[in-house]
Image (cartoon, rainbow, N blue to C red):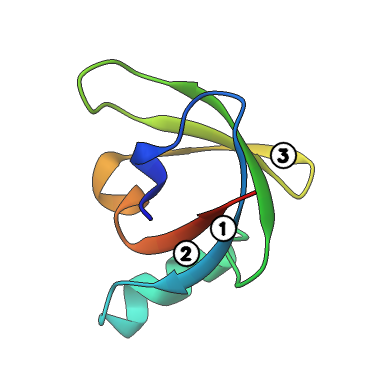
Amino acid sequence: MKLKKMKVGDNGTVSDFSTSDPQYRQKLLRMGLIRNAEFTVVRKAPFGGPIEIEIKGFRLVLRSNEADAFEVEKK
């Protein structure tokens, strides 16, 4: 499932990466988006805008294309 299909307040984990670009994948890893990392959806902008998640004690805002670069599992 993609992050943008989740609702505010939903919890999930990062399950896999959809991007084949190794540099972009490293960027996601540096932001804390590692496999099995648990997060909570805090806010979503309307009309496909940025999504704010809380992961590992900090908040991270992802653009729509960044949110599409990995798969999540809803808890």
- The numbered dot on residue 31 is 1
Residue position for label 2: 28
Disc 2 marks which amino acid?
A: Leu
Q: Which residue is mark 3?
A: 58
Measure the C-alpha gap from mark 1 to mark 3. 10 Å
Tell me: residue 66, above or below residue 69: above
Q: Nearer the viewer, residue 1 or 57?
A: 1
Image side of residue 29 versus residue 70, left or right: right
Q: Position of residue 48 (x, y in %)?
A: 23, 28
For image coordinates 26% across by 80% down, the residue present is 21
Single out the residue that lies furthest toward the top.
46
In which quadrant is the N terminus drawn?
bottom left
Above-or-below relation of 70 to 74? below
**Front residue of this view, candidates 50 and 24:** 50
**Which sits in the foreground, 47 or 7?**
7
* Mark closest to the chain's N terminus, 2 or 3: 2
**Quarter occupied by residue 14:** bottom right
Query: Which residue is at the far left?
Result: 47
Query: In percent of the image, x 35 and y 39: which residue is there?
Result: 4
Question: Where residue 44 sits in the image (x, y, percent)?
Answer: 42, 22
> Residue at left 70%, top 54%?
38
Amino acid on which disc 3 is placed:
Phe
- How far across and down, in percent of the image, does residue 26 sit? 46, 76
**Three-letter amino acid code at disc 1?**
Met
CA distance for labels 2 and 1: 5 Å
- In the figure, is residue 43 to the left or right of 67? right
Q: Disc 2, disc 1: CB below 8 Å?
A: yes
